[in-house]
Image (cartoon, rainbow, N blue to C red):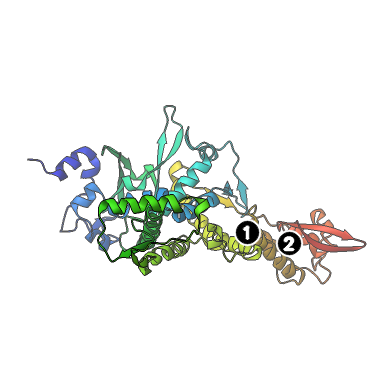
Amino acid sequence: MKTVKDNLRNMLGPWARRGGRSDGAHGETTRHSPSGNLVQRLNRAGNADLDPMTETIGRGAGWANPEYGNYYASSVSVYAAIKLRADAVSRPAVHLYRNTSDGSRQLVGPEHPASQLLDRVNPWYTQGDLWQATEIYLNLWGQAFWALERDENGRREIWPLRPDRVSVLPDRRNYIRGFVYRGQGGTPVAYAADEVVWLRYFNPMEEFAGLSPLAPARLSVDMGRDGLRFNRNFLRNSAQPDFVLLTDSQLTDREVEEFYNRWDARFQGPHNAHRPAIANFVKDIHTLGLSHRDMDFIRGLRWSLEEVSRAYGVPKPLLADLERATFANINAAERIFWRNTIAPEIHFLEEHLNRMLMPRLGFPDIYLEFDLTSIEAMREDENSRVARQVQLLDRGALTINEVRREQKLPDVPWGDRPLGRKGAPSADISADPEGADMRSSAIDCAAAAGLPGVVRKEFGRENTLGMQ
């Protein structure tokens, strides 16, 4: 009788038989080099954590809880934080570059296949849709998967996969054997390791799964959702009266009903508001209010928002918490958001895609880069950096070529000498026609160094520095 493991191995075909157990309890730990010498295999500790079942059905699926997706549709604070991050990541333009022999970089044109793939991800997704889906998946499940497919004409396409439906198949030799996507009905779809781009946040508890930012914040988010449900039910029907009338006698059901009818007739409606009531059979009135537990639920809404703000790195003023907001601290919050949250996230995406996507497309010499110069919140930092470099140029601490290398621009023949006291290169550069116009001031030299935003403004006979 076949076991579940045997059925899965037959379903996955040669993948399940590749790199299986061999010598020893933990599989192969040694291999033969081309020269025939016996050498030690790497990552022996990682092999010790594998077993035939996880190699067949995959690992890490337990960390991609399907319930995490429901928070995006049921928690206002989670939706607002993730939507803000997804919109921010999809906002900068994305360029492809290729390094040249002289140390500079060359912009890859739109006719290149890699550029065309990012411009047309698939027939139904735009490039912005791809970045938004990727960021939303990362923020909900801590990982994102891109399936690299081909259409009927052989043209490349990228399809983002739901992380809670993808399992990673470990491998003793190659670390990852492949991936299995299980559809809504459970139908498995197998992918080779080079057919999927896997982005993940580091998980110290499971190396084959990402760690969702919702995992540590889930309790606080649940508390906020419970508080909202309590408020909704309380406004619909609190299931308790505002006060209780205490009497000395036992009233029949008919007497109670007659009392309610007379009460409604005398006190219901705006024209009877604040009308005094007289009841000779009432001994005392007991007022009912909110308990401390009920008030804690209401205060929990604010605490839930603060925890979501911490987990996703989104300042509270950007989540419409404007209780203490001013124009100045909102601008500061936006700069903090871009500098401390979005810029590292973009660097994370660039590093992973340049490592895994471009080589798998067959273009290892091309790298991807987000252009943050158009972002207003980042422009102030760029202006400060440019002003500092201009000052260093003027004082001779940097040469023009050193600054141009930071801007990833090619060197110029006259740019290796420090500037003189009047802002021109210390040695005679009259022999170089390209450098002849650079004698007048450090501003001209800074503009020649390729510093963004540097322009020359003339006031009378003096040259000064201006920022665009």
In the depicted structure, whether residue 222 falls above or below residue 69: below
Foreground of the two, 250 or 63:
250
- Amino acid at pointer 1: Met
Image x and y of residue 404, in percent: 68, 59
Disc 2 crowd rating (10 Å Cα; few below 14, some 14-19, many 20+) is many
In this view, which residue lies farthest toward the top?
Answer: 152
Name the quarter where the N terminus is drawn. top left
Image x and y of residue 267, in percent: 45, 54
Image x and y of residue 375, in percent: 63, 54
Mark 2: secondary structure: loop
Q: Nearer the viewer, mark 1 or mark 2?
A: 1
Foreground of the two, 428 or 41:
41
- Amino acid at pointer 2: Gly
Please say whether residue 175 is visible from this viewpoint.
no
Q: Which circle marks residue 378 in the picture? A: 1
Between marks 1 and 2, how big is the CA–CA gap? 28 Å
Q: Is residue 174 left or right of residue 461?
A: left
Please say whether residue 322 is visible from this viewpoint.
yes
Mark 1: secondary structure: helix
Name the quarter where the C terminus is drawn. bottom right
In this view, which residue lies farthest toward the left?
Answer: 1
Q: Which circle marks residue 415 in the picture? A: 2
Image x and y of residue 35, in percent: 29, 55
Q: Which circle marks residue 253 in the picture? A: none
Question: Residue at point 37% right, 66% down?
Answer: 285
Q: Is residue 126 left or right of residue 297?
A: right
